Amino acid sequence: MAFINEKNKEINCKIVYYGPPRCGKSTSLKQICSEIKKDTKGELISLTSDDDKTLYFDFIPITLGKLKDFTIRLHLYTVPGEVAYEANRKIISKGVDGVVFVADSQIEKVELNLSSMRELKDILKHEGVDFIDVPHVIQYNKRDLPNAAPLLELRKLLNKHAVPDFETVATKGSGVFDAFQSISSKVLMDLKKVNV
């Protein structure tokens, strides 16, 4: 849920990039960071291991502009995908305003994608939130790989609510910013419903 600071006239929204291990969440955030103007973003913070696995999260704050008298800030987070970090994913996903589910398109990763999606829905349910009520989009990442599953199959498995979805290649930046713009719009539309 967006944090509204009346005193400072700020609205802070949390968007989480969620998905299985090594699907491209951190790479997506780095690409977004590289495309955003310097004066509208903070520093990208990454807590990673020696082999570049996300240990806790990646984070970047982005200022979008104004809504009425309030400055809108998006706080983009990634979650660690490794099984051992389930507790971290739960903590980071609390109070989420929007989700970008990053799926790994490789055929052999289909079950991991499904498992990660189930876990996300369970985390939200535990918070008293239905996944369908949270603004979300889907990135089908690694579309450039020869073993990428057919897009229609991935959609059938992961996008049952027909939300905006995007074919991406995070290492090249392809499609990543489009997904970011889409989730940003959905979060802002959601904000307008609460009559800020």
Image: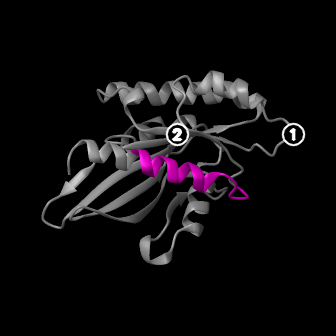
**Nearest to the observer: residue 103 or residue 80:** 103
Q: In which quarter of the image is residue 148?
A: top right
Q: Which label is found at residue 137?
A: 2
* First of labels 2, 1 by sequence position: 2
Q: Residue pushed farthest bottom?
A: 39
Residue depicted at 56% across the width and 51% down the height: 54
Task: Please give the range of residues in magenta.
Answer: 171-186
Mark 1 belongs to which amino acid? Pro
Q: Read off the residue under disc 1.
A: 146
Compared across the picture, whether 46 is left or right of 106 comes to left
Given residues 67 and 183, the one toward you in this image is 67
Residue at horizontal 69 percent and vertical 47 percent from the top: 168
Quick one: 54 or 10, which is closer to the camera? 10
Q: Of all residues shown, which one is farthest toward the left?
A: 7
Assess whether residue 16 is covered by the magenta stretch. no
Query: In the image, what residue type sits under mark 2?
Result: Val
For mark 2, give the secondary structure.
strand
